[in-house]
Amino acid sequence: MRLSQLLAPLGLACTQDTEVTGLACDSRHVKPGMLFAALPGQHRRGEDYIAQAVERGACAVLRGEEGGAAGVGVPCITVKNPRRTLALLAAQWYQHPAQSLTLLAVTGTKGKTTTAHMLRDILLEAGYRTGMVGTLGTFLGREQLAVPDNTTPEPITLQAQLRQLADAGCTHVVLEVSSQAMKQERLAGVTVDGALFLNLSPDHIGPGEHGSWEEYQACKARLFAQCRLAVGNGDDPSWSAMAKRIPPGVAQSTFGFGPGVSLRGSGVEPAGDGLSTRFSVSDCDAPYQVALPGQFNAANALAAVALCRAMGVEDGAIRGGLAGVKVPGRTQRVEGVEHPMVLIDYAHNGESVRALLSALSAYPHRRLIVVFGAGGDRPPMRRRDMALAVAEWADLAVVTEDNPRWERVEDICAHITAALGSRIPWRVEYNRERAIRLALELAGPEDLVALLGKGHERYIECQGVRRPLWEEEVVREASEPLRTARMERSEE
């Protein structure tokens, strides 16, 4: 595609035309003939990598006005908002794949990944060829096509993946949308067919994320300015802020467990093995059942029901999708390990930890043993909140690492144990693999062991390096000799 053809739909022009072979916003990914987008960043400026991109063969540069007017040796397009412009260029480059798809976008502080899986499974049950883009990757049906860098990919990657899904015959795509994605305008120019709001709580506020609660809320709300249908949690006080951004004439509805909502849930209770949940809705005699525990998963399921109903999905498909849903790293039971039972979950802030552990309290067990840490380079208050939630519901804590990033794991664990105080017994083991093994050694056959914070992740990030760690594999390897030793002791 000629550079002039790429720019013209955006009302932009170039002083020198050239053939463009692709788009890149990372100079290391530039190949000859690509347009390089020099984007602003928290730690690094794209401006600083223009020379490297040109050296690697960039045929043109997209840059912000703050970059100055210095020559770069190739055509240069200077714009006020390079992030927004890149998103529009990416959609243009990949021929606007969203226009041929039914896009369902999910946003909220907690539950995006779980709800996205529910929606994906419901749509598959209904017979739609469905894709999904989110925290766990990009999927065609249940087949993973790509491993993610972000919950919502950068626009070049996002548009490429939407094009791949459209070309593979998808009619529907479920998309997790983060507040950071909206802040950086990764979805600029994309209209979603259904936007779903789950909840909002103080999180992602601090250096490199959002400067304030108000900014965080406003970024979430931007999604609802670009949708054809809006469905929101009427129990959440922030829904009003989302609803204010809905364009005139766009249909909207609400769900929740309180009064005044379009679809009201009630009667949440454990079902089956205790790790499933049953709930009722206001206009239906037969309850729904979701294969995940707790009030918070009932709320996620109710959200999925509300959006799917609004989209005209048949009720049998909704029930079938919810009944069989499985989400890696979200209240995931390690199969084949029963005594003690081990669950893996991504809960990594106080509210999500409290919701999960309170749900697990309904499951029969002698003691609840929790292995957890806290991410580095994140607000210290999160560590205290997690510790207090664990102290409220657990019988024993093993404190360990969880992506310390550029902080010392010893300092993070010290913050956590100071908050735990004498509320419950606790042990510290800085190495997470050894911490898991320690928890399993301490656990009796009737105990329940919950590994919190890592979920689907298969690494520990420390000092800029990601060390492989797959918790499910660690549990399996550690459980077998422990099980054998227990059997030998019982036979003596």
Image: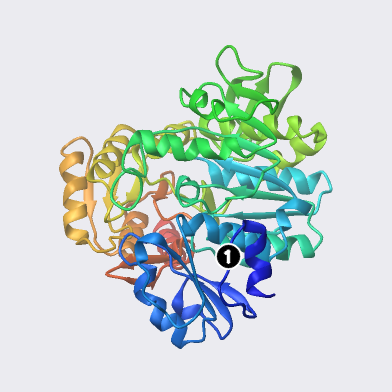
Asked if residue 159 can be seen in this view, the reply is: no
Disc 1 residue crowd, few under 14, some 14–19, many 20+, Cα 10 Å: many
Foreground pick, 24 / 332:
24
For disc 1, the marked residue is 156
- Look at 52% across and 54% down and name the residue there: 84
Foreground pick, 452 / 214:
214
At which x and y percent is residue 354? 38, 35
At which x and y percent is residue 125? 79, 45
At which x and y percent is residue 77? 50, 67
Furthest residue to the top? 259
At which x and y percent is residue 373? 30, 52
Q: Amino acid at mark 1?
A: Ile
Q: Quadrant of the N terminus?
A: bottom right
Q: Along the horizontal axis of the image, is 184 left or right of 2?
A: left
Foreground pick, 367 / 195:
195
Q: Is residue 206 above or below residue 461?
A: above
Quarter of image, res 31: bottom right
Q: Quadrant of the C terminus?
A: bottom left
Q: Is residue 57 above or below residue 12?
A: below
Q: Is residue 122 above or below residue 231?
A: below
Q: Is residue 140 above or below residue 255?
A: below
Quarter of image, res 317: top right
Foreground pick, 147 / 415:
147
Asked if residue 16 can be seen in this view, the reply is: yes
Q: Secondary structure at mark 1?
A: helix
- Look at 59% across and 12% down and name the residue there: 260
